[in-house]
Amino acid sequence: MKRVLLGMSGGVDSSVAAIILMEQGYEVIGATMKLWDPEDDEGQSKCCGDDSILDAKRVCDKLGIPHYTLNLKEEFKKCVIENFIEEYANARTPNPCIECNKYLKFNYFFRKAMELGCDYIATGHYAKTEFSDKYNQVVLKKSNAGKKDQSYVLYNIPKDIINKVLFPLGQFENKEQIRKIAEKHDLLTAKKPDSQEICFIPDDDYAKFLSKKGRVESKPGKIVDNQENVLGTHKGLIHYTIGQRKGLGIAHETPLYVVKLDAQNNLLVVGDEKDIFSKELYANNLNFTVYIKRDLPIKVNAKIRYGAKEAEATLFPEVNGKVKVEFETPQRAITKGQSVVFYIDDVLIGGGKII
């Protein structure tokens, strides 16, 4: 019997993932990453804190499978929180879930699974891994869940371990199906609400978190247009993001949008809506999940943020650790620090960080 270490957040998705894996004949071990203590300065997270660990353990007890708690607080602080702070300090907008997946779930967590003699790791993400004849390897694919698909945040899985990663929920089309299975098995997580915010910022107030104890200096500065005309004063660049229209605090005859965060000069650059559209971007910190020739331009569908629609694009060969992506149609609010992810059909072939 193949053994699987399943990442359990204490939510309904990973709870049902355990059931599916057991029904498929795997020996399942549950494990929850402890990332917080109640007394932590940043506040109690709704996932990966003590309450979530307890919920995951109760689910495992009910299902009759073992449960471990993995203390990864220091790794989380170093790899995720410090990166989040540094990115905002440099006027970039990060996605901490991607960093958590890269450094914790598919690094530390995977290594722990191998130490426990497991054959696979699994999570409750909505995605798929399966063998592809076209690529002659196991590939990462979009799930059947449409808008709920989470493959975007998984592009950093190393291609040499992708054949050891399982996503049991990839076959399902909606969350209601998951909750019905949980209710059928009388799991306490069946009606547990989804977590929407960043786990270490429970109140979703980024600026408050970043300003606390001087993590990032929130220094007022000038709001200027593309011709460097001064239009007003901003309250600190951490309060703004590319494409933002509301909350600028300036009156103008036409709507203005944030088009650039200039950290070096502490300037907030604004312009017309057309100014936030662009047909190209560059990305580095690349990871490709398939073995594919990239010495010539490749036609892909690219996604520039988690909630964005895929768009037809050309991916150019890598030069000095970065790639150029050219879109067929202009894209709204391409944002430094976010990730761009590449698909061919329903296969995720890789991605990188927008620079």
Image: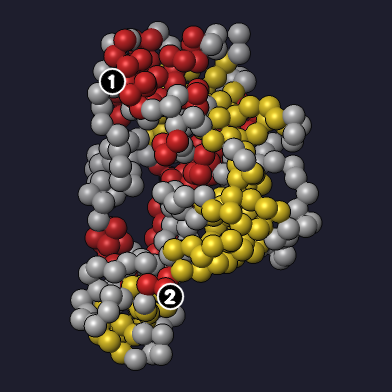
Q: Position of residue 223 (x, y in %)?
A: 31, 82
Whichever of callouts 1 and 2 sits on the residue coming sooner in the sequence is: 1
Q: From this view, report whether residue 125 is shown above or below residue 305.
A: above
Left or right side of 149 for 315: right
**Quadrant in which the C terminus is drawn:** bottom right
Quarter of the view holding residue 108:
top right
Q: Position of residue 101 (x, y in %)?
A: 50, 41
Give the colouring mode of the picture: secondary structure
Query: Which residue in the protein does label 2 denote?
Result: 275
Query: Which residue in the protein does label 1 denote?
Result: 190
The residue carrying pointer 1 sits among few (fewer than 14), some (14 to 19) or many (20 or more) residues within 10 Å by Cα, namely many
Q: Position of residue 45 (x, y in %)?
A: 28, 41
Q: Amino acid at mark 2?
A: Asp
* Local SS, label 1: loop
Quarter of the view holding residue 218:
bottom left
Give the Cα distance between marks 1 and 2. 45 Å
What numbered label is drawn on residue 120? none
Quarter of the view holding residue 85:
bottom left
Whether residue 125 can be seen here: no
The front one of 153 and 90 is: 153
Q: What residue lies at 75% left-to-right and 34% top-to-bottom?
A: 134
The front one of 293 and 197 is: 293
Q: What residue lies at 29% left-to-right and 22% top-to-bottom?
A: 189
Q: From this view, report whether residue 17 is shown above or below residue 198.
A: above
The front one of 245 and 200 is: 245
Q: What residue lies at 24% left-to-right and 82% top-to-bottom?
A: 252
Q: What residue lies at 30% left-to-right and 34% top-to-bottom?
A: 194
**Quadrant in which the N terminus is drawn:** top right
Q: Position of residue 91 (x, y in %)?
A: 41, 69
Q: Amino acid at mark 1?
A: Ala
